[in-house]
Amino acid sequence: MKLVLAIVQDKDSNHLANEFIEANIRATKLSSTGGFLKAGNSTFIIGVEDERVEKTLDLIKKTCQSRKQYVSTPMSLNVSLEGQVPYPVEVEVGGATVFVLPIEKFQQY
Ligand code: 2BA
C-alpha cells in the first residue's frame, strides 16, 4: 500500500474528488496554503493499494491543469522595494505536485 499526497489547485479539487469517488479511490481533502503564493490550494491524502497507484496518478494527471498566475511583488527576491512600484511576475502553477510514500502499517478502528 502507498500514501499518495497530491497538492492541487482549488479550481480542480471538486472535479478530482468526484473522479476519485467514481473510481472507488478513497481520499481525504485538506485545505492548504502554498508557501510561495500564500494562496489556497487543496491537498489530497490517498491511501491506495500498490496496483492502483498508477490509476490514481493518471486521474490526477488528467484532471489537474497547470495555470499561470501573477504575483505583484518578486517575493523570492530578498530586497527592499521601498519607493519602488511592485510589478507583476508570472509564475506557472503546476497541475499537481505529487508525493508517493510507502505505508508501514494501515489500521482502521
Ligand atoms: P506555492 O508554494 O504557492 O507555489 C506556487 C508556484 O510558484 C509554484 O508552482 C512555482 O511555479 C512557483 N514557485 C514556488 N516557489 C518558488 C520560488 N522560490 N521561486 C520562484 N517561483 C516559485 P508549483 O511548483 O506547481 O507548486 C504548486 C504548489 O505545490 C505550491 O504552491 C506548494 O503548495 C506545493 N509544492 C510545490 N513543490 C512542493 C514541495 N517540494 N514540497 C511541498 N509542497 C510543494
Image: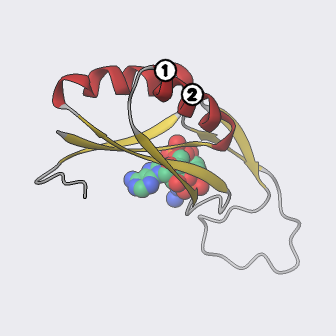
Ligand 1 is within 8 Å of the C-beta of the residue at disc 1: no
The residue lying at 39 percent from left, 37 percent from top is 26
User: Which numbered circle lies on residue 22?
Assistant: 1
Q: Is mark 2 within 8 Å of ligand 1?
A: no
Mark 2 surroundings within 10 Å by alpha-carbon count, few (fewer than 14), some (14 through 19), many (20 or more)? few
Q: Which structural element holds mark 1?
A: helix
For the residue pair 65 and 72, the one nearer the viewer reads as 65
SS class, disc 2 = helix
Residue at the (24%, 54%) spot, across then down: 108
Residue 18, x across and y down, in percent: 57, 28
**Residue tagged by mark 2?**
18
Colour scheme employed for the rendering of this structure: secondary structure
Residue 59 to residue 31: above or below: above
Placement of the C terminus among the 4 image quadrants: bottom left
Q: Where on the picture, by quarter, is residue 79?
A: bottom right
Cβ atoms under marks 1 and 2 closer than 8 Å:
yes
| Left or right: 6 in relation to 68 | left
